[in-house]
């Protein structure tokens, strides 16, 4: 049961009666009451009346029978205190609901979710962490809501660098070093920079690759396959749901690119600029104030990233029948994707029935406030980061929860500081804190040897925990709708804190009769909610620590 929605629905007619037109009740959880509405303040400005006078009139008109008590506070807020009977009735219903009060969506969307996207022949590094973790959390939440989620791992597996990589692989030394992707790439780069003969052969390999030469394509497929194996091993350690069937390399769209250019040209959406064919969607300007170009075909005849992204978008709409396209890619790519979406709209490839959204995110910083790097200034390998988590934590599951929670608990748009000491702490807003809370509940149940019963509220700590448990559905919904996993992490942390306060103040095993059964029921609901919420975020759950 969504108490916030119930209060909203009861307040709305009273506000409309006072305002003479619909007004948003703006009901929010509040430290001053169970819920609070600031609507009378805005309404007072609109009506030119004192806010407390407006609040009192609304309070006199609203019917909250059986739902809540209402009082006017401060400059004109409406404080709402939910009836205890409603809390207990709602909690008892929640206890019998396998979905914990979160119903499946009435109209599921077909969502294509693009995330992670590493490059072939390069090891994943810390820069891939946020896209992978945020994208996977959103995939889990949206899928659990009942949407049809099609995961896409858009691999960088095509382009001129592959001539260099394939030619290096063709030699015995390349075959030997393929197990170490970083070493393989660096060795190929050194040969390209220092050996003119190798450089010439590498350029010919690009031509052969694009022409479909059999031996060259076979080497390329070997390179891609080995890279995918390395990526899947990292995904397994991260506990993310991307699998081998989710890879969709840029190479898949190569045969579509000429058609993309031809179609855009035919629609009059391309024009030449410095030898390149560019689209100039309305509303985008450069630093000089002139129209900002989106390069579709480069001056040398090659295709820009925009061509591949447009081809992929068109396939996702036409072939996958997507109704929502989500791209979890760093914030610096925001303008690029906005322009791609705008061009696709103008071309008719992105109809009004389909939405496209860039889900941007900030950077991971070191404790010095700069981009996170190794002590030698190198990019941090993702596998190395996980190795260090295993070494620092008392168990791999705790280290993984620390890493993932630190990322997900930050507003994705903001940068955050990667601090091992803070992340691994068993207290505070951390992944291990949630794990400790769940392990405590598991231990409690092992000792209890009894079943939970109907819930009764005998003190403020039980009441506060009950209200927190009823907030799960709004937290899941806001995390999904706003594409903000931190909404769910914040809720789970607050729930764990409420349970800790309850546990310290309300003896469970030492209580008796209906009170004991009730407190076991509250503990059980808390454990189930923590477990489900952590699973939706991809955080490992442990029963003992």
Image (cartoon, rainbow, N blue to C red):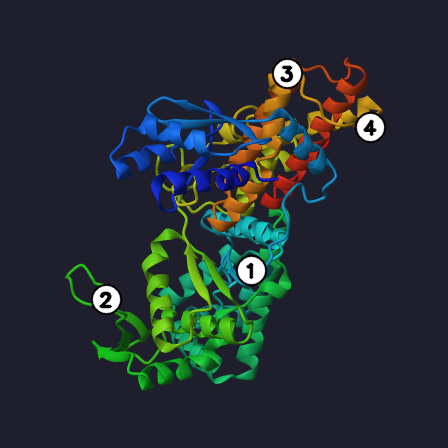
Name the quadrant of the N terminus: top right
SS at mark 2 in the image: loop
Q: Measure the alpha-carbon separation of dots 4 and 2.
A: 66 Å
Question: Is 324 displayed left or right of 17 in the figure?
Answer: right
Q: Residue under circle 2?
A: 292
CA separation, marks 2 and 1? 43 Å
Q: Choose between 194 and 469: the one closer to the eye.
A: 469
**Mark 3 or 2: the one toward you:** 3
Give the label, 4 or 1, closer to the camera.
4
Mark 4, residues whose alpha carbon is within 10 Å: few (<14), some, or many (≥20)? few
Q: Mark 1 or mark 2, which is nearer the start of the sequence?
A: 1
Is the C-beta separation of discs 4 and 2 under 8 Å?
Answer: no
Pointer 1: what residue? 177
In terms of sequence position, does the residue under pointer 4 or pointer 1 come before the other?
1
- Badge 2, how many Cα within 10 Å: few under 14, some, many 20+? some
In front: 268, or 35? 35
Identify the residue at horizontal 18%, vertical 59% (top origin): 287
Mark 4 lies on residue: 451
Dot 3 or dot 2: first in sequence order is 2
Q: Secondary structure at mark 1?
A: helix
Q: Which residue in the protein does label 3 denote? A: 459
Label 4 or label 2, whichever lies nearer to me, is 4
The residue at the point 32 percent across, 83 percent down is 267
Residue 341, image x, y percentages: 37, 67
Q: Quadrant of residue 530?
A: top right
Q: Residue at x 67, y 17 (%)?
A: 458
Q: Position of residue 428 (x, y in %)?
A: 52, 25
Q: Nearer the viewer, residue 106 or 379?
A: 106
Q: Earlier in the sequence, mark 3 or mark 1?
A: 1
Q: Secondary structure at mark 4?
A: loop
In this rendering, the answer to whether 175 lies above or below 532 is below
Q: CA distance from mark 4 to mark 1?
A: 59 Å
């Amino acid at each position: 049961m969504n108490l916030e929605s119930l209060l909203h629905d009861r307040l709305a007619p009273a506000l409309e009666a006072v305002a003479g037109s619909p007004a948003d009740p703006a009901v929010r959880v509040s430290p001053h009451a169970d819920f609070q509405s600031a609507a009378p303040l805005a309404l007072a400005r609109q009506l030119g009346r004192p806010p407390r006078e407006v609040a009192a009139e609304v309070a006199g008109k609203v019917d909250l029978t059986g739902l809540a008590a209402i009082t006017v506070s401060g400059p004109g807020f409406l404080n709402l205190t939910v009836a205890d009977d409603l809390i207990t009735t709602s909690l008892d219903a929640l206890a019998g609901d396998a979905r914990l009060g979160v119903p499946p969506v009435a109209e599921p969307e077909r969502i294509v979710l693009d995330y992670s996207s590493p490059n072939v022949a390069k090891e994943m590094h810390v820069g891939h962490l946020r896209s992978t973790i945020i994208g996977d959390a959103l995939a889990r939440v949206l899928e659990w809501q009942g949407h049809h989620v099609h995961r896409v791992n858009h691999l960088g597996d095509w382009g001129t660098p592959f001539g260099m990589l394939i030619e290096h692989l063709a030699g015995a030394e390349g075959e030997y070093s393929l197990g170490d992707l970083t070493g393989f790439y660096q060795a190929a780069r050194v040969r390209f920079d220092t050996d003119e003969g190798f450089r010439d052969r590498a350029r010919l390999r690009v031509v052969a690759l694009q022409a479909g030469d059999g031996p060259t394509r076979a080497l390329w497929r070997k390179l891609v396959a080995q890279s995918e194996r390395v990526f899947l091993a990292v995904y397994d350690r991260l506990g993310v749901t991307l699998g081998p069937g989710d890879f969709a390399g840029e190479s898949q769209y190569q045969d579509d690119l000429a058609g993309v250019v031809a179609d855009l040209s035919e629609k009059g959406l391309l024009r030449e600029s410095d030898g390149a064919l560019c689209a100039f969607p309305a509303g985008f300007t450069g630093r000089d104030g002139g129209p900002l170009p989106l390069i579709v075909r480069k001056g040398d005849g090659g295709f820009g990233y925009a061509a591949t992204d447009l081809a992929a978008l068109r396939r996702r709409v036409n072939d996958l029948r997507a109704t929502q396209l989500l791209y979890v890619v760093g914030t610096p790519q925001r303008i690029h994707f906005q322009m791609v979406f705008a061009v696709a709209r103008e071309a008719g490839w992105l109809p009004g029935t389909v939405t496209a959204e860039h889900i941007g995110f900030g950077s991971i910083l070191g404790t010095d406030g700069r981009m996170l790097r190794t002590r030698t200034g190198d990019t941090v390998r993702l596998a190395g980061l996980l190795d260090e988590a295993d070494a620092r934590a008392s168990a791999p599951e705790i280290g993984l929860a620390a890493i993932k929670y630190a990322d997900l608990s930050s507003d994705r748009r903001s940068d955050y500081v990667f601090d091992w000491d803070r992340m691994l702490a068993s207290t505070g807003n951390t992944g291990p804190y949630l794990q400790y809370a769940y392990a405590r509940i598991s231990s409690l149940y092992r000792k209890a040897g009894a079943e939970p019963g109907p819930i009764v509220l005998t003190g403020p700590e039980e009441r506060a925990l009950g209200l927190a448990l009823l907030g799960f559905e709004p937290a899941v919904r806001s995390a999904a709708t706003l594409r903000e996993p931190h909404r769910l992490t914040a809720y789970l942390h607050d729930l764990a804190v409420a349970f800790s306060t309850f546990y310290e103040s309300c003896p469970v095993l030492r209580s008796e009769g209906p009170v004991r059964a009730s407190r076991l029921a509250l503990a059980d609901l808390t454990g189930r909610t923590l477990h489900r919420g952590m699973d939706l975020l991809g955080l490992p759950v442990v029963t003992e620590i």
